[in-house]
């Protein structure tokens, strides 16, 4: 009986994949996939431009497109950026993405030793291994989670969103207090506009343009693009940049393969499961992977001066985490990173709500996206290994020209949302806010995530209270809600408690 | 390192301002909502105030780590503001070409001719794609 059920599920999976590949391999969608991975690799290579910003900038342009094609392009951008991010970490000392910081610790020393080719090769092949594994796991796990999620009520969704927000320590910057403040700031920005349940205007200050609330594109472009350019203008004379060239062939020796393979596998597993956790993301995944590699290494002293495992593990981990973070986004509608938060906004823009029902109502889109990730991975391997010298040329683009063009293009993206200069003015205000956040060490990603999650969190809480007739004990009496909320409390306080215990032990 | 009292004061003022505004949200009378529109913003306001105090207790002066070129950022921000102000009346093509060239110079580029050529190329390409392929009309200004 069990076997028959398993066979049935396998057949269903096969059917879904066939539908997905049918959509992903349609000529226009293949073209969009190629555009996505090419753009993604480019933004990964270029420091200061990330996948969240790129998807935000492209959102207004995809209004008229078929959603399946648009999401295939977005998926390509997300995976591509993770591939491309390693190039700057290895060849330039400034990582293109926060998730690539760990890669630079050993990647750049390898370049200085004339082993940039090996570092780039282990990063690209590791990314392929991790991306493929993560997509297989996404394909297997998301439907299971969907089955579980069908039984979720508003209180469970509320608890999961609280967990996503309290786990934001993973996106942490200089201090946990500042991360928490950045998260509450995002929640506060999310309350601007008309309250959907009562029609009451909140924090609009009489401005008509604020009645509809803050568009996520405006917030993302303001925080990431405008803030980044202002920061560059303020610090370009003081922050130096160390570059080294790409010498030799992009390939691995037998010894490199032997050392890289176990690191790829460990990084992949760590990355995927870290990616699933709300709020943890690629940065934590790459950090954990680097730490594990150093601990299991026979020569830990080599780390920091060019150990290939220090590149292979974190690169596999940050790619696998991208696949992992799509699991809660697609199955529950809960984003776990800045990029998936923007993707959630994209779903909302198309009038789609990610979550259990998406799998039954828009299975072509979901499975098309999953199938396209396999195609993207293959395309990325081709783009990143033989054509690596082409991407290295991108590093020659002068930063002043790059940043001024990004600023102009971002403005255009926001303007075309509603052909409204008010939106652009708000981007400016948010950009100034982002500059001061960076100046004082506040991380940006928690704010973006909270802007997206805030309105949903409030909605689910109020629904839960409506169901329980205003009785807050519903959050404790429903077992899953109580467990998830307990995990959220643990996620919020465990690091502080850990530091306290460690300090006590030391003293 | 020294605690950042100035930052804490600013955060507290902003947080208290948000909290006070949250309390001013009127709850609709006779509504069916069990939880009104005020509750969530008040909770967020309290969270902001608590986090401001936490920052005050724990965070040190991060801003001292990176010396900032204030004139550079102010000029850059001013040029961007001017660009936004004249985008609609002057039109996309002229303002964006001028903006990219000028902003690049402010950000440190010294290749004026190259920047001008590239900005014309980027601007005209984007304008053509938007107007002719995507059907999105960009502000034309006097040249249209």
Image (tube, helix red, strand yellow):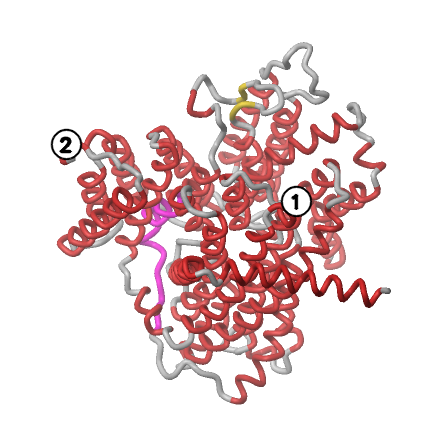
Q: Where is residue A142 in the image (x, y as percent from the top left)?
A: 67, 56
In the image, is residue A88 above or below residue A207?
Answer: below
Picture layout, residue A248 above or below residue B115: below
Mark 1, secondary structure of its residue = helix
Residue marked by disc 2: B142
Report crowding for label 2: few under 14, some 14 to 19, many 20 or more residues within 10 A (C-alpha): few
Q: Residue furthest top?
A: B29
Name the front one of labels 1 and 2: 1
Which mark, by number, is residue A91? none
Name the quadrant of the C terminus of chain B: top left
Quick one: SS at disc 2? Answer: helix
Q: Does the magenta stretch include residue A238?
A: yes
Q: Distance between the residues labelled 1 and 2?
A: 50 Å
Give the tally of numbered discs.
2
Provide the residue span drawn in magenta. A227-244
Q: Where is residue A41 in the image (x, y as percent from the top left)?
A: 41, 63
Relative depth, front residue between B56 and A80: A80
Chain of the residue under label 1: A
**Is residue A96 visible to us here?**
no
Q: Residue A186 in the image: x percent, y percent?
A: 54, 37
> Is residue A218 shown above or below A294?
above
Do marks 1 and 2 both belong to one polypeptide chain? no
Give the residue number, with chain letter if any, for mark 1: A357
């Amino acid at each position: 009986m069990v076997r028959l059920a398993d066979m049935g599920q396998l057949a269903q999976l096969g059917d879904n994949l066939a539908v997905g590949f049918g959509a992903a391999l349609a000529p226009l969608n293949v073209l969009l996939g190629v555009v996505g991975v090419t753009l993604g690799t480019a933004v990964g290579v270029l420091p200061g431009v990330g996948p969240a910003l790129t998807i935000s900038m492209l959102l207004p342009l995809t209004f008229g497109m078929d959603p399946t094609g648009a999401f295939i392009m977005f998926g390509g951008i997300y995976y591509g950026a993770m591939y491309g991010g390693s190039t700057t970490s290895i060849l330039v000392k400034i990582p293109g993405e926060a998730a690539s910081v760990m890669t630079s610790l050993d990647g750049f020393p390898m370049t200085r030793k004339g082993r940039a080719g090996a570092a780039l090769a282990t990063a690209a092949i590791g990314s392929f291994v991790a991306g493929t594994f993560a997509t297989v796991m996404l394909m297997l796990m998301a439907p299971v989670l969907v089955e579980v999620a069908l039984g979720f009520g508003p209180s469970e969704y509320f608890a999961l969103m609280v967990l996503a927000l309290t786990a934001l320590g993973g996106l942490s910057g200089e201090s946990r207090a500042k991360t928490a403040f950045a998260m509450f700031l995002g929640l506060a920005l999310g309350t601007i506009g008309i309250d959907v349940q009562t029609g009451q205007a909140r924090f609009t200050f009489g401005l008509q343009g604020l009645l509809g609330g803050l568009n996520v594109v405006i917030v993302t472009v303001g925080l990431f693009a405008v803030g980044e350019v202002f920061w560059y203008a303020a610090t370009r004379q003081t922050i130096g940049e160390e570059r080294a060239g790409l010498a030799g062939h992009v390939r691995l020796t037998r010894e490199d393969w032997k050392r890289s393979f176990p690191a790829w596998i460990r990084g992949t597993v760590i990355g995927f499961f870290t990616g699933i956790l709300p709020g943890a993301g690629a940065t934590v995944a790459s950090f954990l992977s680097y730490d594990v590699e150093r601990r299991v290494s026979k020569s830990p002293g080599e780390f920091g001066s060019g150990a290939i495992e220090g590149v292979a593990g974190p690169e596999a981990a940050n790619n696998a985490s991208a696949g992992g973070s799509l699991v809660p986004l697609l199955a529950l509608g809960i984003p776990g990173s800045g990029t998936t938060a923007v993707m959630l906004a994209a779903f909302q823009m198309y009038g789609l709500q990610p979550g259990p029902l998406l799998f039954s109502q828009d299975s072509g889109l979901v499975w098309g996206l999953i199938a396209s990730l396999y195609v993207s991975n293959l395309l990325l391997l081709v783009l990143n290994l033989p054509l690596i010298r082409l991407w290295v040329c991108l590093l020659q683009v002068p930063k002043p020209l790059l940043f001024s063009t990004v600023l102009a293009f971002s403005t255009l993206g926001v303007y075309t949302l509603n052909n409204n200069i008010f939106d652009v003015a708000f981007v400016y205000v948010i950009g100034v806010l982002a500059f001061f956040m960076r100046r004082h060490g506040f991380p940006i990603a928690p704010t973006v995530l909270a802007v997206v999650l805030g309105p949903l969190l409030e909605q689910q809480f109020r629904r839960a209270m409506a169901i329980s007739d205003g009785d807050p004990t519903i959050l404790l009496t429903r077992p899953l809600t109580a467990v998830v909320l307990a995990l959220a409390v643990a996620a919020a306080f465990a690091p502080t408690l850990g530091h306290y215990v460690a300090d006590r032990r030391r003293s | 390192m020294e605690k950042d009292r100035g930052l804490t004061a600013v955060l507290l003022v902003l947080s208290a301002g948000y909290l006070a505004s949250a309390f001013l949200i009127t709850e609709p009378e006779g509504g069916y909502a069990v939880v009104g529109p005020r509750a969530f913003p008040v909770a967020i306001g309290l969270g902001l105030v608590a986090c401001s105090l936490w920052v005050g207790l724990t965070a040190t002066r991060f801003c001292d780590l990176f010396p900032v070129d204030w004139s550079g950022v102010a000029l850059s921000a001013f040029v961007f503001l001017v660009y936004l102000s004249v985008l609609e009346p002057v039109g996309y093509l002229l303002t964006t070409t001028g903006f990219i060239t000028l902003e690049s110079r402010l950000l440190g580029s010294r290749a004026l001719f190259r920047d001008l050529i590239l900005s014309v190329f980027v601007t005209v390409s984007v304008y053509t794609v938007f107007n002719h392929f995507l059907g999105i009309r960009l502000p034309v200004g006097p040249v249209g």
